Amino acid sequence: MHGVTLDELVDAPETGDPRINLRPIPTSDGRTVLPLSRRPGGIRAYKFILPTGRDDAEPELRTHEGYDWAFVLNGRLRLVLGEHDLILEPGEAAEFDTRTPHWFGATSSGPVEFLSPVGKQGERAHVRAAPKSRGSS
């Protein structure tokens, strides 16, 4: 079994300036999306910051090709995955096939920050603005 190092995950340069210049990607729904890697293709790492949510919010479940992985840094991440409604705490991670209807959000206890490596299919679903509609993105 081959593990992935953090340097491989965030595509840290082997030489030169190792700092990552974080430029947020604007979204219309209050999220902050920070790219953590500079690789033009393949898997890229992102930090997501979601504003305080509502526990009674009706999530819009989505599906798309690929897999999602999320690691919670701060706050509480609500993950609705199929019929499961889960709360992930700091230090917890989730991984799943994105063909399962899913949704991420913060709870009413405050904003949430999490890391996620995102491939080409996931980039379309998570980073770019999408119209409000149910089903596939």
Image: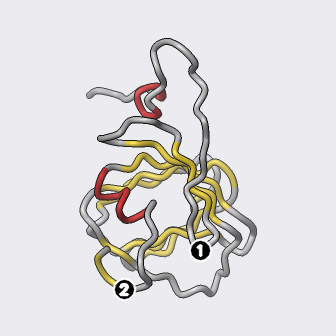
In x, y percent, where is residue 130?
Answer: 42, 74
Residue ID for mark 2 = 134
Judged by depth in the image, the label closer to the viewer, 1 or 2, is 1
Q: Identify the mark nearer the N-term, 1 or 2.
A: 1
Could you say whether the residue bearing mark 1 is in a helix, strand or loop?
loop
In x, y percent, where is residue 44?
Answer: 40, 42
Answer few, some or many: residues within 10 Å of disc 1's Cα (few below 14, many 20 plus, some between 14 and 19).
few
Above or below for 10 versus 108: above
In x, y percent, where is residue 17?
Answer: 58, 18
| Amino acid of disc 2 | Arg
The single residue placed furthest to the right in the displayed view is: 109
Q: Front-most of 118 and 129?
A: 129
Res 43 → quadrant: top left
Q: Spatial distance from mark 1 to mark 2, Cα to Cα?
A: 16 Å
User: Where's the N terminus, which quadrant?
Assistant: top left
Above or below for 108 versus 34: below
The answer to whether residue 17 is left or right of residue 123 is right
Residue ID for mark 1 = 29
User: Where's the C terminus, which quadrant?
Assistant: bottom left
Mark 1 in CB contact with mark 2 (< 8 angstroms): no
